[in-house]
Image (tube, rainbow, N blue to C red):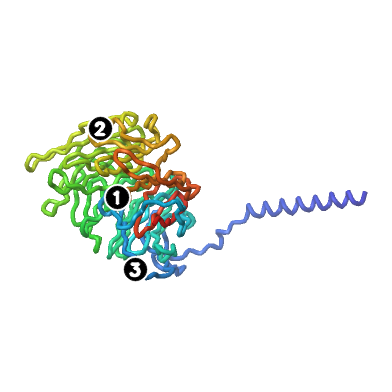
């Protein structure tokens, strides 16, 4: 009986105390002791307050080491310095029976940004979700040791990954284009910041839904980019100073796509060709009238374009895109100083050669591609077509050799194709056919979409979370 009375008493007191605390908390007002202070009275250093969209490109840097290398191999930009995705190497890359050795491996944030290689160093863009930062990372090609990284805060939400673009590198600079259109130029050895440019602020660029996929191009010492903003279609920027030296007015009203600017010589004139959202255009790349819009074609205008235009002849360009767009053949006409372009042929992806993400390769008068998922019975297969007939395949890979959105490149007479699940295939190219020489599981890959890079007997591969270096000779 006494125990029950004690429990009731304790319970009653607890309830009363709790009720008193809650009543007091609601009645108490801390405002009575607030003292107003003038701005700056808290002695906070100036300019430390940051808005979420206040991006300071390249503001952070960390050096981890250095390397002295005798290697001279180079893969300087997306699809290489010839823009063909073809390597003519002095070494024999024909595979033997032994598995390729994985020399090193690096974990990354989720993305598909391709690497470049220059004199024993490897560079690629990465995104750190913990830091909400876009970063350029530099590694030693031989060991995989990270040498330095430069980064900046740019909060984003994951959308099939983040980083998508390959840098462009030379003796004096490396230039990157980040997911939100931020251009960063650094010294390739020291990592020192040289200059930066925000395409959204400078040109009112509308960044594509899946972030920027356009890879930087350099012509001489001019960085050529397609901001496709309200007023500027293409721009040329001095690689050393960051100054804008020419602009192409966006009279055609194109918007930025995931496709990259491709230099070509068409009808005897050097031209920058760009497939934007809204159509395809050619801009003069010659000194006398650089930046002048020569021609445009708006009949072929997919809403999503990732592959770059592929030149087939002196006046013809092959165009492909995913999401049901298929393929098209464009012809460029010249009569003196007058230019025009027309779509000569256009078809759905199940009616002829196409590609959703990777740019096809023109090699020894054949076109090599991976068909899109809506390519009918050829979906996801490697295929070979003749430029003279884009509707009848000359060869296709086996039923179990389907590559999804994986990349491929030609080294000498071998095609290296990477399934988007992480398995590498090597084919001997014997036009019009290809013979399978080797296949090897490299990683249990997830969305291995990023283009490959090759130099000095090393092949760099990546999936959404890992970059790996293979020794292939």
Q: Earlier in the sequence, mark 2 or mark 3?
A: 3
Residue at mark 1 to residue at mark 2: CA–CA distance: 22 Å
| Disc 3 residue crowd, few under 14, some 14–19, many 20+, Cα 10 Å | few
> Residue 149, relative to residue 52: is it above or below?
below
Residue found at x 40% / y 45% = 437
Which of the two residues, 132 or 127, is positioned nearer the viewer here? Answer: 127
Left or right, 328 with respect to 121, comes to left
Local SS, label 2: loop
Q: Residue furthest front?
A: 97
Residue that badge 3 annotates: 70
Q: Earlier in the sequence, mark 1 or mark 2?
A: 1
Q: Position of residue 205 (x, y in %)?
A: 29, 47
Task: State whether residue 125 appears in this view.
Answer: no
Task: State whether residue 342 appears in this view.
Answer: yes
Residue that badge 1 annotates: 86
Residue that badge 2 annotates: 389
Local SS, label 3: loop
Q: Earlier in the sequence, mark 3 or mark 1?
A: 3
| Disc 1 residue crowd, few under 14, some 14–19, many 20+, Cα 10 Å | many
Residue found at x 13% / y 47% = 269
Which of the two residues, 277 or 336, is positioned nearer the viewer here? Answer: 336
| Disc 2 residue crowd, few under 14, some 14–19, many 20+, Cα 10 Å | few
Residue 428: which quarter of the image?
top left
> Residue 430, relative to residue 220: is it above or below?
above
Left or right, 403 with respect to 314, comes to right
Residue found at x 9% / y 40% = 338
């Amino acid at each position: 009986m006494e125990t029950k009375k004690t429990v009731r008493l304790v319970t009653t007191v607890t309830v009363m105390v709790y009720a008193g605390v809650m009543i007091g908390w609601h009645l108490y007002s801390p405002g009575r002791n607030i003292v107003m202070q003038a701005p700056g009275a808290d002695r906070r250093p100036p300019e430390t307050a940051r808005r979420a969209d206040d991006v300071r490109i390249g503001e952070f840097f960390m050096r981890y080491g250095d390397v002295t290398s005798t290697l001279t191999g180079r893969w300087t930009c997306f699809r290489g310095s010839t823009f063909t995705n073809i390597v003519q190497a002095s070494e024999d890359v024909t595979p033997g029976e032994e598995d390729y050795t994985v020399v090193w491996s690096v974990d990354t944030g989720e993305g598909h940004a391709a690497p470049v290689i220059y004199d024993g160093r490897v560079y690629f863009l990465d995104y750190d979700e913990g830091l909400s930062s876009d970063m350029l990372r530099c590694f030693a090609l031989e060991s995989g040791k990270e040498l330095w990284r430069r980064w900046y805060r740019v909060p984003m939400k994951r959308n099939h990954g983040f980083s998508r673009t390959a840098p462009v590198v030379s003796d004096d600079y490396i230039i990157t284009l980040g997911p939100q259109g931020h251009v960063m130029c650094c010294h390739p050895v020291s990592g020192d910041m040289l200059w930066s440019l925000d395409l959204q602020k400078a040109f009112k660029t509308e960044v594509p839904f899946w972030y920027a996929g356009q890879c930087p191009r350099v012509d001489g010492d001019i960085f050529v980019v397609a901001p496709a903003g309200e007023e500027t279609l293409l721009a040329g920027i001095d690689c050393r100073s960051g100054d804008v030296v020419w602009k192409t007015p966006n009279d055609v009203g194109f918007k930025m796509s995931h496709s990259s600017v491709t230099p070509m010589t068409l009808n005897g004139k050097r031209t920058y060709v760009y497939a934007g959202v809204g159509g395809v255009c050619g801009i003069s790349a010659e000194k006398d009238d650089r930046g002048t819009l020569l021609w445009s074609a708006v009949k072929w205008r997919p809403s999503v374009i990732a592959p770059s235009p592929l030149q087939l002849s002196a006046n013809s360009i092959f165009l492909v895109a995913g999401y049901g767009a298929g393929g098209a053949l464009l012809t460029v006409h010249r009569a003196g100083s007058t230019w025009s372009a027309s779509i000569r042929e256009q078809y759905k992806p199940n009616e002829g050669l196409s590609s959703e993400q990777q740019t096809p390769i023109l090699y020894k008068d054949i076109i090599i591609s991976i068909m899109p998922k809506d390519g009918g019975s050829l979906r996801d297969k490697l295929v070979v077509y003749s430029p003279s007939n884009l509707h009848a395949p000359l060869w296709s890979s086996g039923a179990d050799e389907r590559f999804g959105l994986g990349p491929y490149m030609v080294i000498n007479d071998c095609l290296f194709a990477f399934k988007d699940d992480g398995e590498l295939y090597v084919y001997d190219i014997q036009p019009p056919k290809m013979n399978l020489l080797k296949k090897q599981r490299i990683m249990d890959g997830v969305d291995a979409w990023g283009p490959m890079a090759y130099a000095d007997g090393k092949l760099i591969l990546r999936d959404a979370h890992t970059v790996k270096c293979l020794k292939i000779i």
